[in-house]
Image (cartoon, helix red, strand yellow):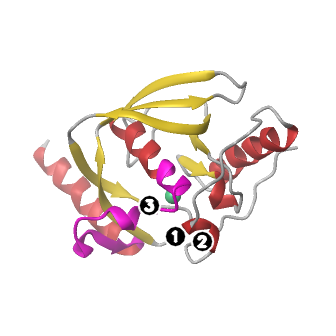
């Protein structure tokens, strides 16, 4: 049975480490890890997670977007496991938007990310795949990929003024929502 695991927080050395390449995606150990990552991501209401966040140095990320109040247009998808992902190409354009992270609870920041990104990876069935992610999915992927190279989202900010605490973030979101309703 897949089970939710502990999420390692910023300060744990694993969060700052480069993840090891996955050698055998189809091994029982890796398949169980992927199942546990999906369950942990869901239990935490995350839209993505990376193996180092569970304390495991393996180059695996899960992308698990679903529509929410904050992202009503986010695509609903089956959680996808990408092993040994490599960035093949990206759009020239960066777009700045809010991010949070299960390893840095309570903090939100505006982070510039490429609006489109092409990725090569190994599927959980062991197949070599390519995928192009746009907008929100491209953002999730870049955030999770960073976890595989020991980076976290606050490393990518343009200004320290773009970092806020959760309570203030909720207030900012509320104001933005009211502003949108006024314009209707
Ligand atoms: Ni994260």
Tell me where residue 27 appears, x and y as whole percent: 84, 36
Chain part drawn in magenta = 144-166
Cα–Cα gap, marks 3 and 1: 7 Å
| Residue at 16% across, 55% down | 179
Residue contact at pointers 2 and 1, CB within 8 angstroms:
yes
Residue 73 to residue 158: above or below: above
Q: Along the polypeptide, which appears first: circle 3 or circle 1?
A: 3
Q: Along the polypeptide, which appears first: circle 2 or circle 3?
A: 2
Which type of secondary structure does the marked residue at label 3 adopt?
A: loop
Tell me where residue 136 appears, x and y as whole percent: 37, 40
Residue contact at pointers 3 and 1, CB within 8 angstroms:
yes
Q: Which residue is mark 1?
A: 105
Q: Is residue 157 magenta?
A: yes
Residue 155 to residue 24: above or below: below
Q: Which residue is mark 2?
A: 9
| Residue at 69% across, 59% down | 54
Q: Quadrant of the N terminus?
A: top right
Cα–Cα gap, marks 2 and 3: 13 Å
Answer yes or no: is residue 96 visible.
Answer: yes
Which type of secondary structure does the marked residue at label 1 adopt?
A: loop
Q: Is residue 84 magenta?
A: no
| Residue at 35% across, 32% down | 89
Cα–Cα gap, marks 2 and 1: 8 Å
């Amino acid at each position: 049975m897949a089970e939710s695991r502990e999420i390692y927080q910023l300060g744990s050395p694993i969060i700052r480490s480069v993840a090891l390449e996955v050698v055998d995606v189809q091994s029982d150990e890796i398949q169980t890890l992927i199942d546990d990552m999906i369950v942990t991501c869901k239990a935490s209401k995350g839209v993505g997670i990376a193996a180092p966040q569970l304390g495991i140095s393996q180059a695996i990320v899960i992308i698990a977007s679903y529509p929410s109040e904050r992202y009503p247009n986010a695509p609903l998808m089956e959680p996808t496991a990408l092993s040994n992902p490599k960035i093949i190409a990206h759009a020239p354009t960066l777009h700045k938007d809010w991010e949070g992270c299960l390893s840095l609870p309570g903090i939100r920041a505006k982070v510039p990310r490429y609006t489109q990104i092409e990725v090569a990876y190994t599927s959980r069935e062991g197949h070599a795949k390519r995928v192009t992610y746009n907008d929100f999915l491209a953002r999730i992927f870049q955030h999770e990929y960073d976890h595989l190279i020991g980076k976290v989202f606050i490393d990518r900010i343009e200004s320290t003024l773009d970092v806020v605490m959760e309570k203030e973030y909720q207030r900012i979101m509320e104001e933005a929502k009211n502003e949108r309703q006024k314009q209707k």
